[in-house]
Amino acid sequence: MKPFAILSDIRARAVEAVLSQSGLTHEGLKTHLRSVMSGPPGSQSVLLQEPIIEGAHPFVTAPFALGNMPKPVLDPRFVKVLDGLAPTDDYRFPATRRPFRHQYAAWEQLSAKGDPQSVLVTSGTGSGKTECFLFPILSDLVTQAEQTTQRLEGVQAIMLYPLNALIESQKERLSAWTAPFAGKIRYCLYNGDLPKTAPASDHRRTPEQVVDRNQLRASPPSVLVTNVTMLEYMLSRADDQPIIEKSKGKLKWIVLDEAHSLVGAAAAEIALLLRRVLLAFETEPEQVHFVATSATIGSGPDILQTLQRFLAEVAGIADAKVHVIEGDRQMPGKPARAPLKAVDLEVADPGYLYDFLGSDPDVWGFIERLHKGTQSLEQAGRIGKRFGLDGEAFINLLTRAERIAPDTGEPVRLAPVRIHAFERAVPGVWSCLNPECRGRPENWPFGRLFTEKANTCPDCQAPVLEAINCMECGEPFLDAEEDLETGKLVSPVRIAVRDEFDLDADTEAPPEETGEGEKDNREIFAPAANPHMLLAANPTGRARPLNLNKQTWNVEDKGGEGRRTFLCEEFPIDERCPCCQVKAKAKTSIYQLVRPMRFGAPFLIGNAAPLLVEGVDPATSVSGVLPSDGRRLLSFTDSRQGTARLSAKIQAEAERNFVRSFVYHSVQASMAASPEESTLDALKAELSELEDAYEASRMPILEGIIQDRKQALLKLTSGSTDGIAWDVLVDRLASRPEVEAWIKDVWEPRDPELFSEPRKLARFLLLREFARRPRKANSLETLGLARLRLPSIDGLTSAPAVFARQGKSVDDWKDFLYAMVTHFVRSYSAIGVSRSEQHWLMPNVSLHSLLPPDQTANGDKRRQTWPSIRRVRGQMAGPLMWLLRGLVLRQDEAADKDDLDECMRMAWHNLQPVFGNDPEHRALDFTKTWIAPVKQAYVCQITRRLLDRTPFGITPYGRFERAEEKLKVLPVSMPTHPAPQLGQVDVQLGAQKIKTWLQSGPEIVKLRESGQWTNITDRIAEFAQYARSAEHSAQQDSQRLRRYEKAFKEGKINILNCSTTMEMGVDIGSVSMVMMTNVPPSIASYRQRVGRAGRRGQSSSLAFTFCKDNPLDREAFRKPADYLKRTVSPPKVALSSRPIVQRHVNAYLLRAFILEQSGNAIQMMIGPFLGCPSDPAGLRPILAERPVALFKSWLDLPSVKAAHRAALATLVRRSVLEGETNLVEETRSAIDALEVAFVAEWEGIRALARDEGLKDAGKSRMHIELKRLCEDFLLGALAGQGFLPGHGFPTDVVTFLPAKAPKKDDQDLDGRSRFRSQGPQRSLDLAIRDYAPGSEIVLDGLVHRSEGVTLNWKRPATEEGLVEIQSLKYHWSCRTCGTSDTTRGVPNACTACGSSDLEPVQYLRPSGFTVDFRTKAHADTDVISYVPPEDPKASTRDAPWTALPIPDAGRFRSSREGLVFYANKGPHRCGFSVCLYCGRAEADEQNWTANDPKSRPFYRHKPLRPRKGEAVDVCPGTEQSWKIRSNLTLGHEITTDVFELQPVAALNRAGSTALVIALREGLARELGVEADEMGFSVKQTTGRFGKQAVSMLLFDKAAGGAGFSVSLESKLANVLMEASKVLDCKTPGCTTGCAACVMTSDAPVEENGLDRVGALNFIREHLSFPAALAEEDKFSADAVLSHSVVDEIGEALRDGVAARLSIFATPTFDSAGLTAWSAATDFSNWKHLGYAIDLVLPATVVPGLDAAARLALHAFVLTHGIQLRSGDAPGSHPTMRVLAVVQGQVRTQAWASRDEAACLPGASWAQPSLHLIARGSLARLPDYPSIDPSSLLPLPTTKFASIESELDISIGLFGNRMATHIRSLLDACGLNTTVPITGMTYKDPYVSSPLVARLLIDTLAALTAEKGRGGEIKIITQKLKSSSEHGPPRQASHNWRYEGAAKSVIEAYGRLKRLTVELDHKDTVPHGRYLNIAYGDGTKAQVVFDQGFGAWSPPAGQPMRHDFDFDVSRQVYQISRQSAPVRKSRFGPTYLVAVKL
């Protein structure tokens, strides 16, 4: 392999390919671009960066051979097996081979006697990491096997792999090493592909492998190779319990491969899962060898310690038991001295080079630097200069240096290298506008040119505009907009190209599709609001002047001095090129005609890949003929569809270029002269005699004869140009091995009937090249390399009479007929091919049959009428235009019309011989054609392509051209190939001839200069070898992947295009080259991928990376050395997430319970488990019969807690829950909360189902909703709800069903589905993007169009469920406050702010996606439809806000129940029309308002997948209008952790995005997790008091949350500091962002999408908290700002010794706040952990409490274990009040604030609102006297009641129910409540909202209902204050803004209830809520409420709207009509106390 030569060829050909494909005709521009793009490496505009050189030395070996190890670390019998394998076996390890040093070190540790040791091996790819653990495992098993006659049974080793591909790749290795033991040592590959049963023959064939699940369960093998998901199922599935039972106590090994990929949540999930596995297997962690393998991380004590800690935390063992082993690279031995004899280095042998170069100090220093890192080619050149060599030659010389090691006899290379090459995309070309710019290139009418975007020219400050050019005429323009605000010219805003393949599309619409039509949406620029113009390099006569100021470059109205006038073309609103007037094609836009110069990966990789393959050394170890001689290239692409499409493109181009090469070389060879020698001699003798006779006689007649004989002789000696008959060429092509075997292998599975025979396939391949002649696309005809010859036309001897009259010849007539066949017959697809051939040739083009001149098609689109001047209606047919121009005829002259008719009739007659014999299908018969060489060609000045025949010397493509000169074609001579590569030829000699010819052949040089000879022509001339390409991605089934891997190893596949599946250690043999079509997202991935090359000791390997036009890739291209210096982060375990750890506790306990009950969790469903039937009429079973109740009772058993205490302690060891003893209680609480939420939803749907009619409830839509809710599988549902770990239970995964229907499988293997589907699967958030209806999906080279959704909620979908009614929900966003949520109906108002200004979107959650079963997949992958999704929308729902530590800076909130909504609204953003019967879906182009679906295009559609017995023409769903829904969004929501930050100060979107990315990175660093485990979003919203604000949101990507985002609340200060560090980037030139700071892989790709500097300035100015406090806040000398009081208290308690927390109440203490005290849960937890908690009340508080308040306080302190004390808060500061103190033995810390609300118990306690909270030290507290809680109990004369959920009812029933409670208390007090009430007074500071007023007055009215309406009712309350920070009040729970309005409405509502109410607002009202009642008999009573009527509110998510702007009567009416339910909204009960006065 010669890597530098390959790169040189790629560089040269890439530049020429770009210039050729661009279509540019401006020579000055082309010359300059050619110069800069192919300039010296390292210059700014080059396409290929200077390569980086890296040492690839082998790994250090042990000093002894395998068979001669000093310690018996491996069983000798096992070593013998390894040595005894066949010499050709890839897995043989000879006893004479030295193991690597790190391998032996691992074996030594893992085989050590005593306590099992664990090992983490970190080493590069290809270093034998698998052998590090597998040899000791198998050696141990061999030792055991020799001690018994039975086979070993029970799992002893679990090998855990992240990918199924890695699991499958272990098969050959394990079989090779275990087969010799005849089944005594067995293994099993346990993943989803393992069948339940396998044929007996499979068991007999592989006794060493367990091949089915039955065998696995009956007799578990020793080695289990599996993945995380299968381990989870194995723990949960009853069927798998025999595996565990028979393996208990036997598990000895756990292996984690690719450990560097385990970070953050993934590492924690696997660590906890493994602990549960050990508990199930009843094995202590200390008795297990844990082995982890990792890519090279780095070195140094810190790294090694981190790795050691990682494995120790995963295993739950001591750090000391983990040994980190590094694989090091081996430096070669340094020669003792230089050779004495001087030898020419170019021819020196490798041994001489080794000694000569290795002994040179400079060279040796260079080798040492290579060993440590990388070197540039320039650095290599400085060393090589001493030897007269450049850098490339010097590296080539180094890699040749080699000697034989004396001790091993193995070759040792001096400096094996890996070469890193980077090629970039072409993002466009920009030009300075100023013609006088000093950087202006020669022959360019404007200024300096740029290949990267700039706004102003650095040389002259003039505007820089993007250059675009017409794809037809090649004319370049500068694209400009006038910015009306600044008056300057700017480039139009560029919309990022959605699909790189669009830029490379080489397709052309057929003539019938070139009329007006729908435009596609592939615009490259945003629509311009400013004046838009084009400045042409060669202005037309229509151009207008444009005046610019020379100083400011502003647009001026007039020209003159100081101005420069340009000529500009108006932007083509008619969609025609201003220069050539060609109109944009139908279904495209003007931007597809006039395009920028942009070229991405598909185009440039398509050019590079064949050259890379050719540069690889051919296979030497494989026998037989192979494609491209078995050369192999491994390619990587990060997206599945990118992988699939690139593979298909490379495959198609390989096929086409091979066929083109074969045809071209065949027709060139056909010209070779091969006359018989006797004929030639006779002709020469005759000619000699004639010449002698002529000399003697000078007879004129002899002169003519002599000329004829010379022509005959010339023809004999120069060969014929007749070419090869079609059928002959088909036969020759069919006999080629490329077609007979390799291409057939691709095409036969696609259409076995058509492509099973090589001849049919060969015919198809030729048809693909000649069926139609493209206008501009590459083909043999447009390249001038071959032509179709028609012998019947060549034999014509006459022409129409008008030809002779107009001076034209028979040859002109033949030219016209050839043009008719090529540009009319073939263009209209009037060709003789079968329908199946047509599908694969032109899937979107219809075949046509030609009609004779006198017939018309009469609307039949299958017929094409023959051109006639009499039938011209609008656009004239091309042949008629040629005749009019060529014969100079007039369309309006009758005689000329007759002549035209004659010509067309005669053409029809003359062409009959070339048509087929079927009179019903007149079309070109290719069997009557020949393929001939082209000697004379003609350049079309319109298309700039070559023509082999032209009518009348004019182009057939000049329909719109008015300039006669451009219509004329230019003749060129085509060269004759010197050495056609066919037959028995010397390929190497011929290749050299061809290379010389291509470089210096005069005809080729001339053609190349004019652009007619391109890089593609070069490849064809060289004979492009066929290279097989295949897709290897996760969307392929596993069997196909294994087949492709095997074929690639054998050299039968040359290019394996992989997604990420192959970057981890799948064994595919040795390759020397890796190609990446994008820069990998992490350096770890890059290292993994490049490490696939050069693993077998090659002298050099090449890593070729294409850098896309995005920020990350651009940075890697600019600074490749810096990119390669990035380090791989060591893996970490984040066991700091409480939710993650608790979920595993839940999983452990649920498994234990289900196994005790002999249940099967896999088969259970969520509804039955929770006791919720799916029948609307069904009732919940009694408590004892509900599994969930049994589970909770089981959890409550003391014996359960005792039995599992030790196991749970083991499970949570080294985690955030270590030491906590309430784990079982937490599980109980979690299942309680889950049950409550589920039952609430179940009840709501059941009520709706009943409303639809109980009789039909079983068939109603809501019944289906109920089934969907209840019949989801238990484990998946619990994981989705966050109760169980989601990592092992894949949820929300859907299938795309391609053309074949799903295959029913009666084996319910994993409980994930009752059916297994055939088709790729994706998580739903990605599937909505990739598989949306209208999208086209490429699978293994075929294009499948998604036509709809599968209508079943099960995952994956089943055929039987397609007609079930679907779940439709709404996602709504509040335009006022930004809150969003999903609901089953549209709410009346926002749940957060009450605004009715909502934006609802109805959405369908698809269960999968599918094709139309009638639509056959095709293979045209050039242009693929793609439906872009929306950005995810995150919301904290209606979580309460908390002020930042500095309240004026902003606020934040978080929610464990946050929402992330993924959606796709279709290409037009109008959603989709979906049939809910069959699932068919189409994108809507408008928002439909009509109710009748019959008015919509979607009506009367065909069923997507009709059921048996149904009609296939019209879907039955169209008869039921409700089943057709329009404007539906496809959506998917997850509940997860969301954090929202809302600063007060303004920040633009780019700065906000940079800031939230920095926050994410800062939080990830703080938590030790990966940043990409969290997503982010930015949205404009309304802030406090109605001001505009921006919210920045972080969310956990995992459904259910992982606790990451919400932890930002407690870590805000540290995270902000880390974010500031991230933003303070030190990278030179970084302004917007770079990869070192905020330019992450998911950052915005558009220009100006990030503003790093703006974000940094913002965080410094607005989000930096002061280090020193103001004096007014400094309550102690060391006082500092408190960031999170509760978290700081918790930390202080943990750090203190015998710490006590004292909470200090204010004199205004109100017991009503106790139930809303959010910190109460923390008090309980701290008490549970053993800390003392005091609540200190001022001495005046308790005596002032009413009886209800006393009861509430009593219940609170007893519930939370708090000691009541009496005393005043410490401290002497005049304004700061202490709210809490933590006192330990050493230190006393206190928290204080000027904010009174922060000191009051309730939701706002310890939260800054108006003022900050400070933290500082105080002196020790005095001993406060305690208060006996029993003293709070009421007197015996009082009666009380506690109310919890008794009043959670409809608001209309509340008053009566509350009155009943009050009456019962009063009766108990001895009052006669039947006596009429004469008056009532209610005192409550908070009667301020419509809701409280309604509840209060309804209660008072109910109390007086039976006793008349006598007496006055007085309500005394406090003056109002607003309750809403979102602007005006909107909900019934909000306060009125004005006392007058409140008074009027409340009193009016009282009158409506027949009460006389007086409302009195006081400045102050004492705390307490009292109702005083006076009876007619003179008795009086008092009822005390501890919380009042404000304790009840609407349920979450059900806003109760109230319009405060209505007049009094309308407000009263609105209050009276409220019917929503109310719920007690706080924790704990509320109390009523009654006393007789």
Image (cartoon, rainbow, N blue to C red):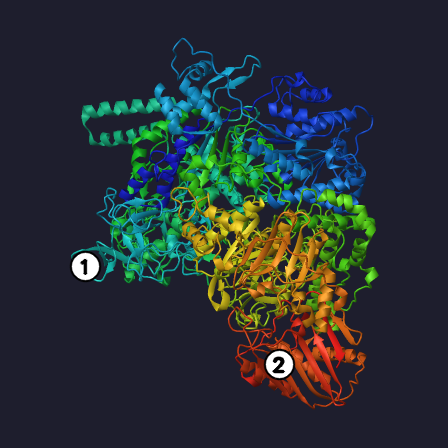
Residue designated by label 1: 559
Q: Which residue is mark 2?
A: 1916
**Vertical position of residue 2016 compared to residue 1414: above or below:** below
Image coordinates for residue 425, horizontal then vertical, percent: 41, 43
The answer to whether 1482 appears left or right of 1148 in the picture is left
Q: Judging from the image, what secondary structure is the residue with disc 2 in?
A: strand
Which of these two is toward me, 934 or 285? 285
* Outermost residue to the left: 561
State which tag comes first along the sequence, 2 or 1.
Answer: 1
Which of 674 and 1463 lies nearest the eye of the viewer? 1463
Q: Label 2: how many residues lie within 10 Å, few (<14), some (14-19) or many (20+)? A: many
Q: CA distance from mark 2 to mark 1?
A: 80 Å
Going by the numbered disc 1, the residue's amino acid type is Gly
Q: Is residue 141 visible?
A: yes
Q: Classify residue 904 as left or right of residue 1357.
A: left
- Is residue 1355 visible from the viewing direction of this image? no
- The foreground one among 279 and 905 is 279
On screen, residue 1864 versus residue 1062, left or right, reads right
Q: Position of residue 1057 (x, y in %)?
A: 53, 39
The image quadrant of residue 1052 is: top right
Residue 1187: % across, % down = 80, 57
Residue 1273: x and y in percent read 72, 54
Question: Of the residues shown, which amino acid type is indicated by label 2?
Answer: Ile
